[in-house]
Amino acid sequence: MVIHNKVNSGIVGLDKVIDYLRLGDNVVWQVDAIDDYARMAEAFVTQAVLEKRKIVYFRFGDHQPLINRPEVKVYRVDPGKRFESFTTEIYKTIEQEGEKVLYVFDCLTDLLQYWYSDLMIGNFFKVICPFLYELDTVAYFALLRNVHTNSTIAGIRETTQVLLDLYRVNDSLYVHPLKAWQRYSPTMFFPHRLHDQEAECITASSEAAELFAAINRSGSRLDYWNVVLNKAEEAAGRASPEEQEKIKKLLMHRLIGSQSRMFALCDKYFTLRDILTIAHREVGTGFIGGKSIGMLLARKIIEKEGKDTLASYLEPHDSWYIGSDVFYTYIVQNGWWKLRVKQKTKEGFFKYAPDLKEKLLHGKFPKDIQDQFILLLEYFGQSPIIVRSSSLLEDNFGNAFAGKYESIFCANQGTPEERYAAFENAVRTVYASTMDEDALAYRMERGLFNKDEQMAILVQRVSGDTYGENFFPQIAGVGHSVNLYVFDEQTDMNAGMLRLVFGLGTRAVNRTVDDYAKMVCLDDPARIPPMHAADKSRYSQHLVDFISLTENALVSRRADEILNGNLKTDKKIFAGYDYDRAKRLKELGHTNKPTPYIIDFKGLLHDTDFVQVMREMLSTLAAVYEYPVDIEFAANFIRQKGYKINLLQCRPLQTKGLGKPVAIPELTSDADCLFRQKGHFMGGNISLPLDYVILVNTSAYQKLPEQEKYAIARSIRKLNTALKGRHVMLIGPGRWGTTTPSLGVPVHFNEISNMSVICEVASSEAGFMPEVSYGSHFFLDLVETGIFYAAIMADRKNTIYHPHKILEQENQLPSLLNAEGAQYAPVLHVA
């Protein structure tokens, strides 16, 4: 019989004890054996069938099926899919089934064999339980007693409506209600003996004491992951090599992921002790992410394959990891899962991202995670640290995600409370960057929008030392095992290249404003891109990024200010005296200026073995990867001519290779040519018929007010969408992707991602100059997307450049962009 919103459990005595189940109830059974839970579920389902209710069974456990009746709809869900896919599948099924459905779930404890985390079982319950309540359902769940942590049980107790202990003592079954929301009786929370359909209340103190004395209750319990780690620690000391390998793989599946090329390399180079060391430096549970894996693997490869000499150059590793489960916990505990599910759809991918990003910036972390954050910060003390994204898909074969997610420097100064607040904000900022438009567009373009993109975090001690009140590494940069940027026919592309800066490596990975990193061909470090001697200073690094301990922030200063301080080693390693600038300053009467320097790394490149060591490191890594590699590094001189290299990151360098030889057609006249030059290109050999050329008119663009230059960038974005699938060459003044419109066109990469060829035109007269920033995140995007790049040195005598060849043709812009096209037709020309 159905009484209003009340639902029968199938056991009359139990219904009397708890005053029936109610629509909206989630019922959690703590049991010693699955068979006991199966008996309760069978009674519940039998009664529901009699009442002709709709019943759904979610099957995912390793135990025997609880229900085997034709009236019950069964959904088989694979827990091996990981938390998000598993939870989302169940969530969407519940949404599809609608209101007033009765549910039976397999035992949640079985999920530990797949997730290795009590935390995630609690998260699953906190996602599903409120949604079931919202739909007026009744759902049965079970947990094995004495397996889960007290905090997990507490979280489930807080969330569920009904919590029941089920005991079997001397062949008798007892139920002890621990929670029955919005109902009460004087005897409700006594234990009750079940027999047939009756429930006998145990009120006598002697009988209750005897009953509870017979029940096995353990004290405080470790998280399942910690139990696994403790067993692994024991095995590392005494188990056979075969057993250690088996345990190592088990831990790797939880920390690194499923079988892949990266997994195979890690399996080859990591020992069980290595994996345990990683696990003991993890906050929370889950994967440590692609960036962490790439960095750790590269260091192990150098240690094992680089002979004793190469490994001796490595600075000791000192990082921590925030597991990917913390990312999901943060979302679930703050109540944003429903929004997350909506955002993960194709329709909501961009629509709901801004709202979710804003929430991610302002959430709270659970107390146990906060406690672990404090321990991490106590470990690093007041050393500056960097909080870096390390998502599951990052730095892997096929998708680099270079520069798509945030990395935040923490100067780590101030009181413990201030340092903690800054650290938490850094973690939030990295999490929020998963909703950045560039990152979302990157994932959408590569068909990854519906993939699990859990965000783990790599926390590294910043490499460097204090120089007065400033903290920085003396050298930082990126390195590629192949050099795809050709400016000299003598270049040995397989020797690799470096992109060096003085100070923090931010200037090596980003396209900087009016600043130039040092490009080094590792086959001949003396070879420099063609330039006039007078331009040597102009096209060098002028600003240094460092951490100011007094300002408690990342700051930039003129290089001369830093170089005139005490660098604790010979500054000729990094910079030389700038005679031309010194002469000009003297002529202008500036006698109180700091001594002028040019950051040329002449001493480093010619008087040390740094080039040889970096070339060997890159070739060693590439040989093991069987693929070109891209690294980030820092280096510090600890004594005269002696240095240590901190290998910060390593990933496969996405490249198509050189392509087949291409015959360049003979021209009857230079007048027939749009542009021709030797060198200054990237993208291998190609012969590509063009459908369109988009040209930004340099002189017209230069005259625009700044806001309209941004408008030009947005118009190019619309052309990028309108012409997708066509072969398009994009030509513009200065630097594509700059943040400063006076230096070029301020587009984001996703606004030019469909182009086939991108050209940056140098114009000394207009003040536009490409920064051939091969090795930066912008250029990694070009390489990965397969876009051909050329820097058109229009002022060089051997370069032909005839933009009028485009401007003479009819402008297709108005027809492509309608009224907006007509407005910007004098600046933006589409042929």
Image: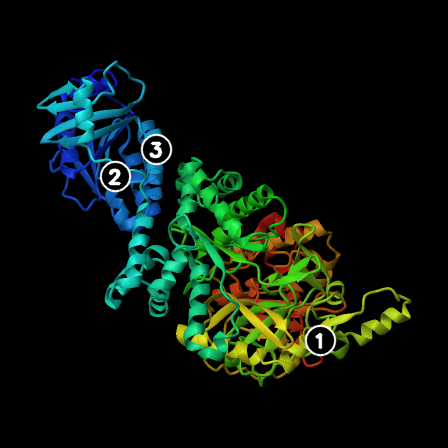
Mark 2: amino acid: Asn
Of callouts 1 and 2, the N-terminal one = 2
Q: Which residue is mark 1?
A: 572
Q: Residue at x 28, y 16 (%)?
A: 184
- Measured from the top left, where is residue 753 in percent x and y? 52, 60
Which quarter of the rendered picture does the N terminus lie within? top left
* Disc 1 crowd, CA 10 A, few/some/many (<14, 14-19, 20+): some
Q: Which residue is mark 2?
A: 146
Q: In whole angstroms, how far apart are the C-alphas of marks 1 and 3? A: 62 Å
Which element carries disc 3, helix, strand or loop? Answer: helix
* Disc 2 crowd, CA 10 A, few/some/many (<14, 14-19, 20+): some
* Disc 3 crowd, CA 10 A, few/some/many (<14, 14-19, 20+): few
Q: In whole angstroms, how far apart are the C-alphas of marks 1 and 2? A: 66 Å
Outermost residue, top direction? 186
Q: Which residue is mark 3?
A: 154
Which element carries disc 1, helix, strand or loop? Answer: helix
Outermost residue, bottom direction? 490
- Measured from the top left, where is residue 437 in percent x and y? 52, 49
Of callouts 3 and 2, the N-terminal one = 2
